[in-house]
Amino acid sequence: MTYRPFVVLAVLVVLAGGLPACSSGGADPSGASPKPSADAAQALEIARRFAQCARDHGYPDFPDPVIDGAKLTYGDWGPEVQEQSRAVGEVPECKAIQDQIRALGDADSAPSAADLERLKQFAQCLRDQGITGWPDPKTDGSFPIIGTPLQSEAKSDRTRAAMTACKQHWDRGFRVS
């Protein structure tokens, strides 16, 4: 299985203001971390350039992306880094880098019906875990929390615990809108 759609989605989720994202892929039977595919390595290189662009344009603590096994991540993402990512995306040089990532694949397509159902189950689980008011996903798979009290609570210990408890429904990254 190739990493391409998942890595591109992971990077786009991060750059578009989403939360941490994972790609799929099998573990190496020897226990070693799987080597990223050429597409994953290319996405990682472009994402590193975006992180540097962010640091060059007023966000000195913007984290570098890493591939940990089959997972492309920027580490402990919270609302402040998501907002920085959106702001940096307005800088022409940085937007050009985002466009390069988008050119790697069509990650903005709507999720499959099965994935949308899993996202709905994830949302219900979060509500069951005490994150009241967590909305169902929109048809594009994003959760409309920007500008709501949930946006500022996204990094709280309570929300993190709920997301961990709900991983059986959705264990990949997702977008917020």
Image: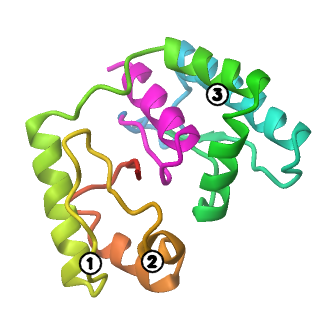
Give the residue type at disc 3. Answer: Leu
Which residue is painted at 49% across and 78% down in the image?
153
Residue 42 in view in this figure? yes
- Labelled disc at residue 44: 3
Query: Which residue is under mark 1?
Result: 133
Cβ atoms under marks 3 and 1 closer than 8 Å: no
Residue 78 in view in this figure? no
103 relative to 76, above or below: above
Element type at mark 1:
loop
Percent x, y for residue 123?
Answer: 22, 66
Cβ atoms under marks 2 and 1 closer than 8 Å: yes
How is the rendered protein coloured?
rainbow
Percent x, y for residue 116?
Answer: 15, 45
Element type at mark 2:
helix
Query: Which residue is under mark 2?
Result: 149
Determine whether, in the image, residue 92 is placed left or right of residue 32. Answer: right
**Front label number (3 vs 1):** 1
**The magenta stretch spans which residues?**
1-24
Which residue is painted at 73% across and 31% down in the image?
50
Give the residue type at disc 1. Answer: Gly
Determine whether, in the image, residue 66 is placed left or right of residue 125. Answer: right
Within 10 Å of the Cα at label 3, are there few (<14), some (14-19), or many (20+) other Cα atoms?
many
